[in-house]
Image (cartoon, rainbow, N blue to C red):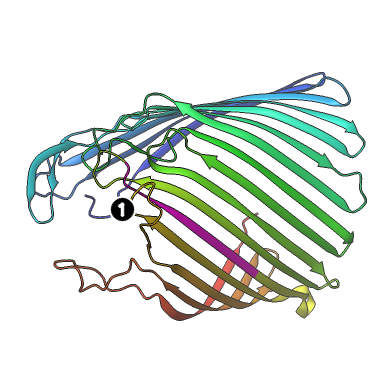
Amino acid sequence: MYSAAPDNQAHQVSLSGQYQLDRTVMNGRIVSGRMIQDENLIQMSGNPLQNWDGQVDTLDGRFALTSMLTNRLRLGGSIDYSKRDNQSSSAEFAQYNFNSLTGAFRQNTPRDLERNTYKVNASYRIASGYRLQTGYDRKEVERTFSDREQTNDDNLWMKFNVRAVDNFNVNLKVEHANRSGSLYEASTLTSSENNSLLRKYYLADRDRNAFELKVIHTPTDWMSLDVTTRYAKDEYDNTKIGLTESEDYGYDVNLNIQFNQYIDGYVYGSQQWINSHQVGSQSFSSADWQDDIEDEFINLGTGLSYSGLMQDSLTLGIDYLFSNSISDTLLYNNVGNANTFSTYGDYYSYNHSASMYADYALSEQMALKLTYRYERYFDTDAANVGVNDIPGMITLGDINHNYNAHQVMLSFTYKLR
């Protein structure tokens, strides 16, 4: 409804402080802000406003405390508060259908958001190089004009860190999380489009169990290797229509090498799998189809930089990235009838990206950089249709899903002291 990006104002006042009493440290912060937007609207049939008075008031606060009870035990906690109060004007607007007025009116809804976060934690040094941490986090969110006005996220976690082994740093984290909240009801804003049994995954009841293991190895002072693996499973037991289960796992590997004083290199790779199960309904009365979705992602990269040229003013570098993703969907037409199924259509994509650059320091504050980048991209998607396949549809053209791209960029950097 705006003819151009509207002007806006944002004001913020903050107060922060810190106090230390013996081995206890307390700090706090409070921030009050206001965002204002008052611009003329495009005049059109059914628009009752000449201009829109937009105002959002924000209030944020935080208090944290950390205390060393003994040389081995440390306790801590924090309280965070955030409120977004939308004071913007509202009015009823005519609802447009494909090419005509529906006759219905709908009012814009200034949405408010209020969030409280509570955290308590403890850290205990078992012995030199061995540390155990545990904590409990709770986040309470209240939102207006939503399918679920209140959600509560509880998270219980534990970390174990080992530094005693030479050249190794091992971190293990496990957690159990749960989401609950107020009564879930179809929003009046979306009830005509969505099934009343539908549960949006970011609002629905959920149980999560996860762990992460990270190992950092530095065999020499010029080489370091990081390996991270993770696993998480989400279950939405109270969801009848929507996402009911999700599994996410993968690993990352990073190798950094400093060949000499001037040459640095790196190699990294990662792989991730996401498997999910969801249930749907065409009848708007009960579940009558379900599907399993399997996604896989691969990222590989390497790079090299050479510095110290031209009296330490010039740095040359090269980077390469390869990424690939695959998605398979198996659709069951009737819940409980595994013999009636079909594939939704496979999707895969790949991307090759390479760049070369020369970074020249004109002075301590100014630098000039010349970069050449090449990209090769391809994907296939069964959902894609031609621009002429839908009667009456007007687009800016078909998106190219198979292309080569070249870019040359010259940039100038100036650092303010």
Asked whether residue 244 is in view, the answer is yes
Residue 220 vertical position relative to residue 408 in the rendered view, above or below:
above
Q: Give the range drawn in magenta.
A: 287-300
**Magenta segment main secondary structure:** strand
Q: Residue at x 83, y 35 (%)?
A: 131
Q: Residue at x 36, y 29 (%)?
A: 184
Amino acid on which the number 1 mark rests in the picture? Ala
Q: Is residue 146 magenta?
A: no
Residue 374 vertical position relative to residue 160 in the rendered view, above or below:
below
Occupied quadrant, residue 133? top right
Disc 1: CA contacts within 10 A as few (<14), some (14-19) or many (>=20): few
Question: Looking at the image, which is closer to me, 29 or 295?
Answer: 295
Furthest residue in direction top, as rendered: 21
Left/right placement of residue 147 relative to residue 317 reads left
Where residue 373 sits in the image (x, y, percent)?
55, 78
Question: Looking at the image, which is closer to me, 125 or 80?
Answer: 125
Q: Residue at x 9, y 44 (%)?
A: 46
Q: Does the magenta stretch include residue 296?
A: yes
Query: Badge 1 is on which residue?
Result: 5
Question: Looking at the image, which is closer to me, 14 or 58?
Answer: 58
Left/right placement of residue 93 relative to residue 147 reads left
Occupied quadrant, residue 157? top right
Q: Is mark 1 on a helix, strand or loop?
A: loop
Left/right placement of residue 313 relative to residue 71 reads left
Where residue 7 sits in the image (x, y, percent)?
32, 47
Q: Residue at x 42, y 47 (%)?
A: 278
Where residue 100 sits in the image (x, y, percent)?
7, 52
